[in-house]
Amino acid sequence: MSENPVNQTLGEMPESAILARIFPRLPSSDATIVGPGDDCAVMQAPDGRFVVTTDMMVHGPDFRLEWSTPHQLGIKAAATNLSDVAAMGAKPTGMVVSIAAPKETEVSFLEQIADGFHDACLELAPGSGVVGGDLSVSNTLTISVTAFGDLEGRKPLLRSGAQPGDVVAVTGRLGLAGLGLAALFAGEKDTTNPLLLSAQLAPWPPISQGVAGALGGATAAMDISDSLIMDAGRIAGASGVVIVLDESALDDLAAHLAIECGVDASHARQAILYGGEDHALLMSFPADVALPPGFTALGHVAACAEDETPHVNMGEGVLPENGWNPYTSWNGEIS
């Protein structure tokens, strides 16, 4: 056993002692009635409803310790779940977090993950926090989060609400995370623009824009986690429509990204269309509604022609629904 308590591992300490070190570092939720310490947490639900989402991050297909610090892992695990809540037009209220880690993992590593959760909640979703969770040992580091949100009396934003004539708009950055991931796979971490690495390893999505979009009249929404094209295709499929992207709008975004990140415009455009894990918010709005601040128009919604299936197109062509897929895009390596 390590003589330094700071360096003690999961295998050297009882669960109660580990949790006693972790819980004080976690953010609390304004909606908490009963927090960690009982068999269940109790949270307020003033709306009478709540939205709930869950997401798992597994070492290998979802992250690599060679690339990420534990603090970044905490930020990413929080941000990806908060973004899903925001995509429903809800205000994030709380999370439960379960972690399974190798028994030789130092408890200080878990403390740094907790610090990442703290910072993400404080900056991205003030008032939200961690209300409970679980801890176990496993050969593979896994972080599982379930997040909750309050609709505050509003209808939830669904993928199925887009209507012909709507404007399609995005809030948040597109392409950065995909370029960052490509650089990491290429072994170029040390020479890559830190902005790209940060977007991939510790994303900072526009969480408050979920409520802003709902208040601004959005008809449909979702978090862009796999790619703009894949996720726009999901809205198209759920709504039974065609999403038509404006080529000039995409060219403008690509030109800005190319200058900012030092890549050519065609590379930037591919990253915007097909790069994953941006966690921007994609929404549709009625054409007669002014877009809320921070939203950029990308195209419009059209009705499917007779015998036409829902899809995404730009110019004259249907765009292939490519993007990040951890089931097929992961090459099986963990370092």
Image (cartoon, rainbow, N blue to C red):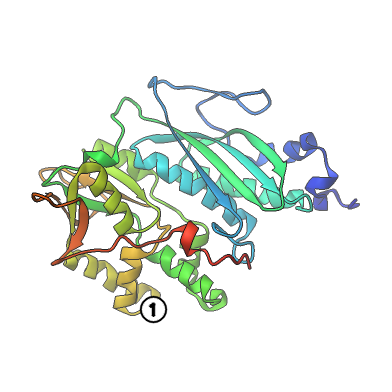
In the picture, measured across the screen, residue 2 lies left or right of residue 162, that is right
Q: Secondary structure at mark 1?
A: loop
Residue at horizontal 81 percent and vertical 53 percent from the top: 7
Of residue 293 and residue 176, the one placed in the foreground of this image is: 176
Residue at horizontal 27 percent and vertical 53 percent from the top: 233
In the picture, measured across the screen, residue 101 lies left or right of residue 180, that is right
Neighbourhood count class around disc 1 (C-alpha, 10 Å): few under 14, some 14–19, many 20 upward: few
Of residue 201 and residue 318, the one placed in the foreground of this image is: 318
On screen, residue 222 above or below 324: above
Residue 295 visible within the image: no
On screen, residue 108 above or below 35: below
What is the x, y in percent for residue 156? 31, 32
Residue at horizontal 46 percent and vertical 71 percent from the top: 182
Residue lying at the far front of the rendered structure: 307
Among the 4 quarters of the image, the one containing residue 20: top right
What is the x, y in percent for residue 99? 65, 44
Q: Quadrant of the C terminus?
A: bottom right
What is the x, y in percent for residue 150? 40, 29
In the picture, measured across the screen, residue 228 lies left or right of residue 186, that is left
Residue 334 visible within the image: yes
On screen, residue 34 above or below 323: above
Q: How many marks?
A: 1
Of residue 253 and residue 187, the one placed in the foreground of this image is: 187
Q: Which residue is mark 1?
A: 262
Among the 4 quarters of the image, the one containing residue 118: top right
Residue at horizontal 84 percent and vertical 48 percent from the top: 5
What is the x, y in percent for residue 75? 54, 51
Give the residue type that dot 1 points to: Gly
